Image (cartoon, rainbow, N blue to C red):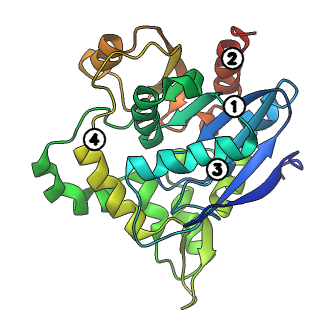
Amino acid sequence: MMPKLNLQRKTLNLPQIQLSYLEWGQGEPVLLLHGLADCALVWASLGEYLANSYHSVAPDIRGHGESSKPENGYRSADIIADLQALMDNLGWSDAHIIAHSWMAKVACVWAKQHPQRFRSLVIIDPFFIGKMPSFTKLTFPFFYKVLPFLKCMGPFPSYVAAENLARQLKQYKGWSPLQEAAFKAGMEEKKDGTWGSKFVVQARNQVFEDVMLVAGLTETLEVATLLLLPEQGLNRSEFQIKPFRTYLKNVSMQKIPGNHWAFLVEPDAFNQAVAKFLNSFT
């Protein structure tokens, strides 16, 4: 069993939505941003690891987990507005911001627009940092079926059926107590008795459209940045890494064990890499 976690769940009431978030520790502010179709609990290991020196907050991004799921409003601009409101509510003028996959791209857009919000930036295996060509919209239905992070959307006839699929996916390789807890936190029984993800279809569709229209890196960023590249991650070729070398002028790149979800499959090495980077600012 997973040990009892020293975290709190809280809710921020915004004009249009409720934003649910998890909170660990005390000290310097750290904002943890999960990827598409995940939820805040994927950061449980890191939040616990940093708790003695850092005040970590991990929101369920709108459309995910326990946060609201409106019919519209899943552009990068909407997500960034939520995060700035959360920081303002916490009394944070700036923070160390750690973001995975799709949210790593959104974080780069945010850093370009509001660099004063960033004490530092950690981006983990960003998903397609550039602007996707318009013709790729035709391939979205294919992506919806094959991408590992979307396969748990369901519907499934039972929780057991959903778990049996999850155990075969990369993000849950090994099925540790951490992985099981993160999976359970993102699932729910639907009104018709089937099971599926708390992540909703309208969020999936609108995020993919936004990814097609928005490039993550288009101009120089001076924010101190750590780019974490898992050995079995998405960004393995020099062609993929070139935009980070071009636009991030204060970047360190580090290879770490594991796949795209290194914080779930190799949490010890991942936590140590992040902590070493954060500690360099103290």
Query: Residue 177 location in percent, x, y?
Result: 75, 49
Q: Nearer the viewer, residue 144 or 34?
A: 34
Q: State the residue at coordinates (62%, 74%).
A: 188
Q: Residue 278 — which label?
A: 2
Q: Amino acid at mark 1?
A: Val
Q: Position of residue 193 (x, y in %)?
A: 58, 89
Upstream in sequence: badge 3 or badge 2: 3
Q: Residues within 10 Å of mark 1 (few under 14, many from 20)?
A: many
**At x 27% / y 25%, what residue is drawn?**
218
Of callouts 1 and 3, the N-terminal one? 1
Q: Position of residue 163 (x, y in %)?
A: 59, 65
Residue 272 on image: x %, y %: 70, 19
| Badge 4 density bin: few <14, some 14–19, many ≥20, Cα 10 Å | some
Distance between the alpha carbons at the discs numbered 1 and 4 = 25 Å
Q: Quadrant of the C terminus?
A: top right
Q: Is residue 89 left or right of residue 2?
A: left
Q: Secondary structure at mark 2?
A: helix
* Res 115 visible: yes
Numbered circle sitting on residue 59 = 3
Q: Which mark is residue 30?
A: 1
CB atoms at circles 1 and 2 under 8 Å apart?
yes
Residue 261 placement, left or right of 217: right
Task: Tell me, for residue 214, which label it has, or none.
Answer: 4
Residue 54 lies, with reference to residue 85, above or below; the image says: above
In the image, 235 versus 90, the foreground residue is 90
Marks 4 and 3 sit apart, C-alpha to C-alpha, by 22 Å
